[in-house]
Image: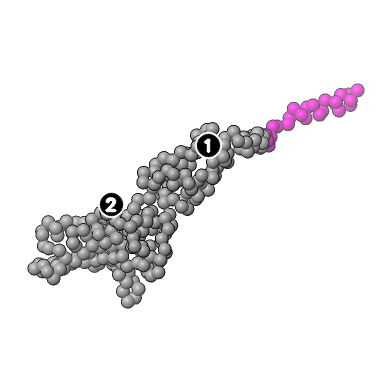
Amino acid sequence: MDRWNESRYYPYGNRRKRKINYKRLLLSLGFLCIISLMPMVCSSFFAIKDIKIIGNNSIPSEEILAAVDYYYGMNLLAVNEDQVKQALQATVPVKEVNVHYKLPHTLVLEVKEREIAAALNYLSGFALIDTQGIVVKLVSRLETYAIPVVTGFKVADAKVAEKPEFEANEAHFEAMLELIDSAKPILNELSEINLAIDGNNNPSFYLYTLDGYQVFLDECDDKKITTLQELLADIRKRDVGKGLLDISHNTPIFKPFPSSDSRERR
């Protein structure tokens, strides 16, 4: 009798001592959630019926929509944000894209446009680029743009939303972009930025201001641009005439143009 009771109640006591496996329970619940959500992701209940564009100023919404129109009808919950960004930036010159959605049927694209910084001669017109070298627009004239023209490069091909291709001096394009980025505070004062290559294939740059000054520098950084602004302000204030300002060395040198009576100043 005692043996029978012992064998009868032993399993019950053992069951009471078992602990709940929370990790396995959470995995099971997660799996059930995925299974329950799959019909929603695959169904047409969240099909995209509207794509809203915000943040664009110069780029028409129609142009942006044309790059992503194949998302219409796709399930909103199945949209991959990175794929949307890549699809848009491949053809439209936008710098940033943030993807949101508004249930049940609206995909929201918040864009930040690229800012035009300079122009490159291309065919019979110009390719307008930002500080990263991406072509923002192709135009025939620059009448409405207060930006410098970059010379010293020969553009072979230029497509919007891509970097241009060059026939010559492509290796120095990144150095030019660094200069343009550093010179942002004075870009609206410049008419031209010229790339010059010496016998050792080393680049140097000439800046031409709208009011007739020429600036020579071998490389550029933010500190040099600040110095340049101060020097030009001083030269203009002293009214010493137009000339070449050489800031390629530690000691800046101002050389008046031949038509000026001023002497070389240090």
Instruction: Please say whether residue 197 is one of the residues in the magenta stretch.
Output: no
The residue positioned 12% from the left and 63% from the top of the image is 241
Q: Nearer the viewer, residue 88 or 14?
A: 88
Residue 49: numbered disc: 1
Instruction: Please say whether residue 28 is one of the residues in the magenta stretch.
Output: yes
- How are the residues colored? one colour
The residues bearing labels 2 and 1 have C-alpha atoms spaced at a distance of 38 Å
The residue positioned 74% from the left and 27% from the top of the image is 16
- Identify whether 244 is placed above or below 108: below
Residue 26: quadrant of the picture: top right
- Tell me the crowding category of disc 1: few under 14, some 14 to 19, or many 20 or more residues within 10 angstroms, Cα based: some
- Identify the main secondary structure in magenta: helix
> What is the x, y in percent for residue 243?
16, 65
> What is the x, y in percent for residue 203?
32, 69
Q: Which residue is mark 2?
A: 144
- The kind of secondary structure element at disc 1 is loop
- Identify whether 179 is placed above or below 63: below
- In the rendered image, the residue lying farthest to the bottom is 199
Q: Over which residues does the magenta segment extend?
A: 1-30
